[in-house]
Image (tube, helix red, strand yellow):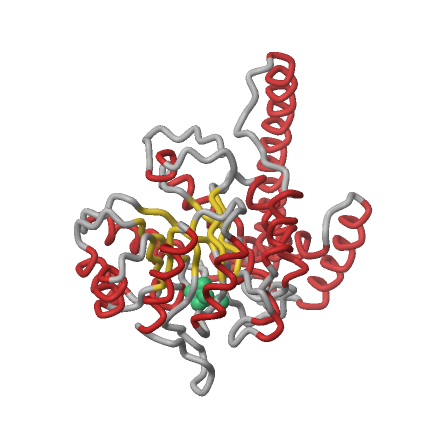
Amino acid sequence: MENNKEMRTWLDDLNLSHPLVIAGPCSAETEDQVLKIAHELKDTDVNYYRAGIWKPRTRPGNFEGVGALGLKWLQKVKEETGLKTATEVANRNHVELALEHDIDLLWIGARSTVSPFIVQEIADALKGTDKIVLVKNPVNPDLPLWLGAVERLASADIKNLGAIHRGFSTYEKSKYRNNPEWQIAIELQTRFPDLPLINDPSHITGKRDMIFDVSQTALDLNFDGLMIETHTTPDKAWSDAAQQVTPKNLVQIMTDLRIRKETDPEAEYNTQLNNLRAQIDVVDNQLIELLGKRMKVADGIGQLKKEKNVAVLQSKRWNEILGKMVLEGNDKGLSEEFILRLFKAIHQESINHQEKIINH
Ligand code: PEP
Ligand code: MN
């Protein structure tokens, strides 16, 4: 993919004409399975062949990976197909074994990124390596943890770094297995503009029929590549069966995806874009003005409630506002989810203001 980052990275050195693709099964199951999938991915856009060797399962009793034995199968993949190899490492021992078996790309899983001790142990074990090391976002939506893990690896003199966005767990019901919370990935890009950023639609969606849409969104947001779990018989996979696609599906997905350029030099495009952006700036300023005005009114209500010693929260009134705004928003093409989030934030700010007034 076209790359406009300032520093040259390992990704630029690959000189790809398309986004980076990492594909392969969630787990290495048998030697036959690993080799069969690899041969089917051999003459496609796939750049790295992934397979989990040690599987971090949430509950015991599920398949926990074949262990070091599988590293030999990955070596065979490289010999037979020329594909470079990738696997997850979760402690010093995994790192040593992966390096011994010449795995080309190592990633830190979401359940490891949450633990600074584990990340530090892995960073120390990898010190100075020129292998590619990718850091998945932590399970919980916590940007500093993700940044911290990248910083620990950078401090260990690991130069070929990158990040994988695999979504965040939530207790609330969602159509995703892990909510994308795109804003967090965008903020990571802002903090580390030169860090290659890969999207993992498989773990975000948990369902194969949603993978295309999430991949397209990622490319629309300037992601540098995709990691997609691929299996020749997905429904029979020993882990993550519902989200794996066949090699044929994967090729179709890659064909259908529209690859966006970061920008276009054409003058007409730039004039129109600048014009629209100027309009956005005006509206944004109006929004802030209005929010400030609304807050002043809320302050007045706070003053009244204080005089009469009335509680700040009035749930009935609040529910009426929400219901009305959802309907109005719908009219303007704004989703219910957005309106609820927006008004909850506004309401919280009003409560904070009124709390201050009532208690001072
Ligand atoms: C995986 O890539 O198979 C995996 C276990 O992912 P995550 O760490 O994102 O859950
Ligand atoms: Mn998986």
Q: Nearer the viewer, residue 204 or 103?
A: 103
Q: At x 25% / y 43%, what residue is drawn?
A: 159
x and y percentages locating residue 249 in the rendered image: 64, 55
Residue 296 occupies quadrant: top right
Residue 67 is at least partly visible in this image: yes
Q: Nearer the viewer, residue 353 or 211?
A: 211
Q: At x 46% / y 64%, what residue is drawn?
A: 35
Residue 137 occupies quadrant: bottom left
x and y percentages locating residue 242 in the rendered image: 61, 70
Q: At x 54% / y 47%, what residue is drawn?
A: 44
Indicate the quadrant containing the C terminus: top left, top right, bottom left or bottom right: bottom left
Q: At x 34% / y 62%, what residue is drawn?
A: 113
x and y percentages locating residue 280 in the rendered image: 62, 29
Tell which residue pokes out farthest to the front in this image: 80
Does residue 259 appear left or right of residue 198 in this picture? Answer: right
Ligand 1's quadrant: bottom left
Does residue 142 appear left or right of residue 262 in this picture? Answer: left
x and y percentages locating residue 195 in the rendered image: 36, 41
Tell which residue pokes out farthest to the top in this image: 267
Does residue 154 appear left or right of residue 203 in this picture? Answer: left
Does residue 147 appear left or right of residue 242 in this picture? Answer: left
